[in-house]
Image (cartoon, coloured by chain):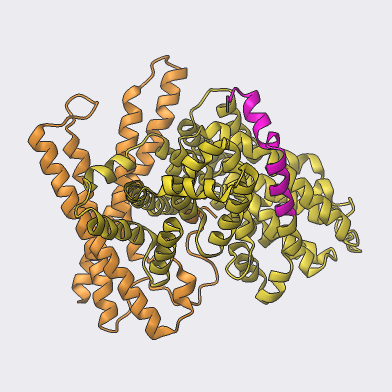
Chain colours: A yellow, B orange
Amino acid sequence: MLFLGLMAVLIGLLYLGLPMFAALFLLPIGVLLAVEGGLPALGEMVVGKLDGYLLVAIPLFMLMAHVMVRGRVVDDLYGAAFAMFRRVRGGVGIATVLACTIFAAISGSSVATALTVGKIAIPQMLRYGMSRRGAFGVVAGGGTLGILIPPSAPMVLYAYVTETSVGALFLAGLLPGLMMAAMFAGYVMITEGRARVPAGDPPPEAILPVMARAGWSLTLPVFVLGGIYMGVFTATEAAGTGTLYALFIAAVIYRTLTWRDLIAGMQEATRTSSMLLLIIAGAAIYGYMLTKLGVPQKLTAEIAALGLDRTGFLIAMMVLLFLLGLVLESFSIILLTMPAILPAMAVLGIDKVWYGVLLTLSLEMALISPPVAMNLVVIKAITGAPLAEVNRSILPYMIMLAIGTGLLIAFPEIALWLPRQAGYAG
Amino acid sequence: MKILAGAVAWLSRIAGAVGSVATVTCLVLIGWSVVARYVFGAPQGWIDKVAGWLVVMLVLLAAPEAQRRFEHIGVDIAVARIGPAWARAARILGALSVCAVAAILVFAGLEAVAFSRMVGLMTDIEGVPEWWIQAILPVGAAVLFLVAAVQALVLAMGGTPDYLPTGNEELPRDTLARGE
């Protein structure tokens, strides 16, 4: 109860207009002064929290995403997917799911995926006769894959907070991500079979040249994940070399990245990282407060008193995460919940890598859950469609994500098989 | 007021630019450490440590510029829906809360520096004292304080600070920072 009470106060502060990092500093400082009558060595705590080798991966992954988004590689990706599936039943929708899947691996952002793929894919899908609801839904739903399919910034943060292997987490997200992509593609094939190549449509570009062009961007996730999987790079080195490789692709191969883009991308990546990492510093003080108040122990005792088993606990957490996702963004949810529930997870024998993937799936559902769903806001912005219409388009994808979460709870191996092949011992 | 706001904006941009240079340096160093290990067979252990310091630098020096652009993560959607007068009040409260945090960090940073100097704390890299790294905290926090204070002042006087969100933005400002 204390945990939920503190979270309610924090959310209240956010709704009063406080930035997340300020609320995360001020709440624990106020509580600690009231309860303890003093504060820990804040300066050492903040600098010590930020000075971590794994955290170096965050600005570098952010920079990689900015480079690839600004490099406009999505045009070729979508072109290749479209050329492959153009004549298949529901092919234009399947191509969109495929483009979302690949761009997710490149950008690590769900909203960036929905935005960049949606701009190209939605007009094409509508031209091919897909229903508006179907076209909006597939982009909003497909976009959610951004934070599940590695590399994924929320997973790096989760790994940092829970002291889990980033490589294992990335590998664990891969099969569930592909499973969700297959479910989305199957749904489009069944429900949007009437989409046809319009009469008089110009002959499609030959598949091979367009595939060859898109191939370069396809190699980026292979390079990053392959490097980690084979033990060539640490996660931080994979982020660094991946960014250099992304720069090579966008600037030398595609020639779509200008100096202006590059400088703007670097400035944005720096500010983005600053915002996120400042929240991490605040969360360290929040975590210190939780420990001082004995919140993790109390929460573990309350769960034991409720008689929740592993599955019951996971379902309760998925519901809580989904609800938090309606009012908070992904990074804050990870930072606010994990310090409190880690001991309970250990008692219940819940694997941290498995839980990380489940958590990401819950965050994905929140990303497309009205009233404040970022992916839906993006669809509204790029199509001008009423939000009510966009909201209605997403229900099947929420159900599929819920099914995917249920499957993953029932069969943890969907997430854990691949990391175990790479030597993960959890 | 305009001169003060301009001077603080200039300071914030300079700090932000130094933060961006830290990001680029980080990228170059990490790239070099891989090349040094695999091509020259000479692992560069010091790079791991220095990259961590560069992260401290980029976070604390870019934070004022993110504040100047009203980009720090919050529940923007709530502020956008409460009407202009209440939204202004919420923005003032937000800026004042940042001032409070920044002031606390300035003092905490100065305290940390003084303590490290007093006991002669050194980092793992020879010749580099701990306080060199800790000194970034009060510097960045002081610029952050100035930026937020000017924003609060301009808003309280009925003015419009640079980059103030109008509430009509169709897309969220920075979704990558939200992990979305």
Q: Quadrant of residue A96?
A: bottom right
Left or right of A245: which side holds B141? left
Is A406 colored magenta in this rendering? yes
Q: State the image coordinates of residue B17 (x, y, percent, origin top left).
A: 31, 52
Comparing A292 with A407, the one in front is A292
Which residue lies most toward the top here?
A: B41
Left or right of B137: which side holds A392? right
Note whether B166 is above or below A29 in the view shown.
below
Q: State the image coordinates of residue A11 (x, y, percent, origin top left).
A: 43, 65
Is residue A111 in view from this perspective?
no
Dominant secondary-structure state across the stretch colored magenta = helix
Q: State the image coordinates of residue A411 (x, y, percent, origin top left).
A: 72, 38
The N terminus of chain A appears in which quarter of the rendering? bottom left
The C terminus of chain A appears in which quarter of the rendering? top right
Note whether A307 is above or below A329 in the view shown.
above
Comparing B131 with A306, the one in front is A306
Left or right of A1: which side holds B53? left
Left or right of B32: which side holds A230? right
Q: State the image coordinates of residue A64 (x, y, percent, origin top left).
A: 51, 43
User: Residue at the location (28% across, 51% down)?
Assistant: B61
Q: Quadrant of residue A393?
A: bottom right
Q: Which residues are magenta?
A: A400-426
Is A181 colored magenta in this rendering? no
User: Residue at the location (22% across, 76% down)?
Assistant: B2
Q: Quadrant of residue B155?
A: bottom left
Note whether A104 is above or below A190 in the view shown.
above
User: Residue at the location (50% across, 61% down)?
Assistant: A328
All told, the count of numbered labels is: 0
Is residue A230 in view from this perspective?
yes
